[in-house]
Each structure stands twice: as C-alpha cells, then as structure tokens.
Amino acid sequence: MERLEEVEIDEMRLPRIFSAMRRGGLYSRCRCAGCPPCLDAARRLLRGIANSSQTSSPYRPERWGDRYRTLSRTLGPRVVSVLTDMSATPTVVDVNVRPAEDSGGAQAGAGSHPDSWDSDAGDGGVHGELPLNGLLAARIPAALRTRDGSEPLKDLVGKKGIPGVPSILFKGPFTVGALNRPGALDAIHRGPGLYLAQWGAGQYLGMAHDLRTRIPQHLEAINRFVRNARDYRFYIAPLGGDPRPTERRILEALVALVGTNRDSVASRFARLGMTNRQREVEFF
C-alpha cells in the first residue's frame, strides 16, 4: 500500500470539500463542477497534506476534544487546511483554503522571504550555472537567524559546502512564466539528472530519469493548483548515469548537517527550508 493511500477521504463530503477548494482558487484551469480527474487530484492533494502537513493543531477542542485535528500546508499564495478525523484511520472530513498572508503566526513566517523573483524574465529565465550549496543556502528560512543576526545554517551550507557532496552545477533558473511559453521545454535536458525546485515557502531536491518528462509534471501541477506562480523556479543538473545514488548521497549529507538522530528526517530537512520528507522520496 502506498503511503498516501493510508489517509481516507469522506466521499460523501467530497463534493462539498471540492466546492470549497474551488472557491479558494484551486483548479482554476478547469471549469468543471467536479470531473473525475479534478476529484482525483483533490484526493491526492488532501492525502498529501494529511501525511506531510506543515502545522497541526487541535480543532475546536472545547467541542471535539482531540478527535479532530487541522493539518495545513502552504501552497504558493494559499494555505490549505484539512480537518481530519484522527480517531481511527485518518479521514479528511473538511477543508479550508485562505490566502497565505491571512494565516498569521508560523504559517506566514514559513512562507515569507525578503527576496522577490520575476518569473517572466525576458531572457527566458536561464541565467547560468550555480552550485547546489549556494542555491540551498539562499533559501534557508530567515527565522533561523540567531539573536546577533548571524545565520549559522547558511554559513554551514553556503560557505563550508556540503560534506561528501560532489561538485555539481545546476542550470537555471527556469521560471514558470518562461516554461509556459511555446517551445520553452525544449531547453530542458532530455535524460537523467537532479533538479531543485524553489518557491516562496520552501525548496525541494529531487531526481529524474528524464528531466524533460519530470519538470513538465511539476509545471502542470503548479499551473493547476497555484493562481500566482511567480515564486516558482527550477534548477536542473544533467547527469550521465543513474541519478538516484547521487540524490541519496546529497540528501544524506544534508540531513546530517542539522539535528540529531532523535529528530525526524523531515524536521531536519525543514530546518534547511526543505520539504523533502525522507532521504529519498518522490515529489507529491
């Protein structure tokens, strides 16, 4: 059984849940009232949030006790929160979609960064080749700065490098605005490699046996779920062989930089501003 299948969706409530997601601005490219592809995509999204939420808090404790919990994830300019019945098999029973700037507290901090990216650069968005350590360090959350203003994690990743990680240069950025243009995907390497996806709320390192196929899959999800995709960009590093061992070696080195073995892998990645959940995982 796949991990996402362990979370159930209350099918009787799904039409109402889907309507709420539509009102919140999701699935804006399809004008259906709940066609099978959109409903299936909604199920995957809700299961993914319930499995890998950024925050979890009691929902109406004065009424429900600990039975229900709200699990949330920031998706571009929105926060999607799902109400999950945790009494038996986790079951999604309701959903709320709101602008990220209205979420407040940790959610707003998790998705806020001082820099602004232009997704419609006239040169197609490709600016050169950059080392992985510098790209990762640039997106480490500012909230991790110490009181004296220093950024030890950025220093650790950016200046000292990542121990045991091969010297790989990533081409980019490939912005969503540029990739949506006719013929733009021809610039993506056809073959194996690594890629780094970055957006306002985080970053993700993944691998692909064919980058030309994998990047459009992410692009399709962004175009479907995100109204304003200006913050999204990709960097790619073509490789000559199987990319999985290299990906695992990098993720193992990254997770060793922070925390201890008592901390979960996901929490240690989160300190680096990454949404990777395991040392080796596919992007939802």
Image: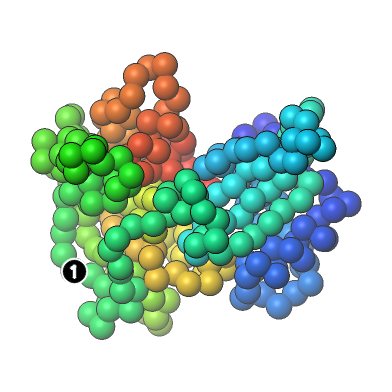
The colour scheme applied to this rendered structure is: rainbow
Q: Secondary structure at mark 1?
A: loop
Q: Residue furthest top?
A: 262
Quadrant in the picture for residue 124: bottom left
Instruction: Report the residue marked by disc 1.
Output: 127
Whole-percent x, y for residue 94 in the image = 76, 51
Q: Residue furthest right?
A: 12
Give the image location of residue 142, x and y in percent.
Answer: 29, 48
Residue 259 vs 45, above or below: the answer is above
User: Looking at the rendering, in which quadrant would you find the N terminus?
Assistant: top right
Kindly identify the residue that appears in the image at 24 percent across and 37 percent down: 146
Nearer to me, 241 or 164 = 164
Where residue 128 appears, as percent x and y from the top left, is 16, 65
Residue at 57% in and 68% down:
224
What is the crowding at mark 1: few (fewer than 14 residues within 10 Å), some, or many (at least 20)?
A: few
Q: How many marks?
A: 1
* Displayed quadrant of residue 39: bottom right
**Left or right of 76 on screen, residue 65:** right
Residue for point 75% across, 41% down? 60
Q: Amino acid at mark 1?
A: His
Residue 37 left/right relative to 15: left
Is the residue 137 above or below the residue 23 in the image? above
Residue at horizontal 53 percent and vertical 72 percent from the top: 227
Tell me, yes or no, if residue 207 can be seen here: no
